[in-house]
Image (cartoon, rainbow, N blue to C red):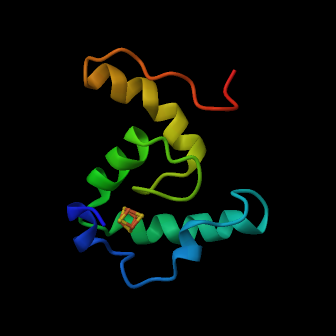
Amino acid sequence: MHDWSRGAACQAMDPELFFPISTEGPGREQVEQAKAVCRGCPVRQPCLDYAIDTRQLNGVWGGTDPEQRRSLIPTVARRRETVPAPPLPGDR
Ligand code: SF4
């Protein structure tokens, strides 16, 4: 458990909501429900930072799905003035 996660809005929720089998089809509705929880979460930013830093490839973290996180990596790298992160597995 990370310090930031103690204030998580999802703390007492079913983790399966945040890890749908797919982000497409019926799983899309589940993703949107999870993102709605994240929108009211006081630790959304540290959660998102953690997910990007540790390359979480699945699930909803910090109000984002995996595809959104992949697109954020270059922006985060520039903001931190670091060398861009290597591509995620499966990226071309
Ligand atoms: S931002 Fe979302 S996934 Fe992250 S701790 Fe908050 S509710 Fe949970």
Q: Residue at x 68, y 62 (%)?
A: 28
Residue 87 relative to residue 22: left or right: left
Could you say where residue 9 lies in the image, as x and y percent from the top left? Answer: 33, 75
Q: How many numbered marks appear? A: 0
Quadrant where the N terminus sits is bottom left
62, 4: nearer the viewer: 4
**Residue 62 screen position, x and y as percent:** 39, 55
Say which of 43 and 5 sits in front. 5
62 or 6: nearer the viewer: 6
The residue lying furthest to the front in this view is 1
Q: Quadrant of ligand 1?
A: bottom left
| Picture coordinates of residue 49, whole percent (x, y) | 33, 45
Q: Is residue 77 above or below residue 14?
A: above
Quadrant of the snapshot with the C terminus: top right
Rendered position, 46 above or below 68: below
Q: Residue furthest top?
A: 83
Q: Residue at x 39, y 75 (%)?
A: 10
Left or right, residue 51 beside residue 89 = left
Q: Is residue 34 left or right of residue 75?
A: right
- Residue at image position (42%, 41%) is 52
State the image coordinates of residue 66 (x, y, percent, origin top left).
57, 47
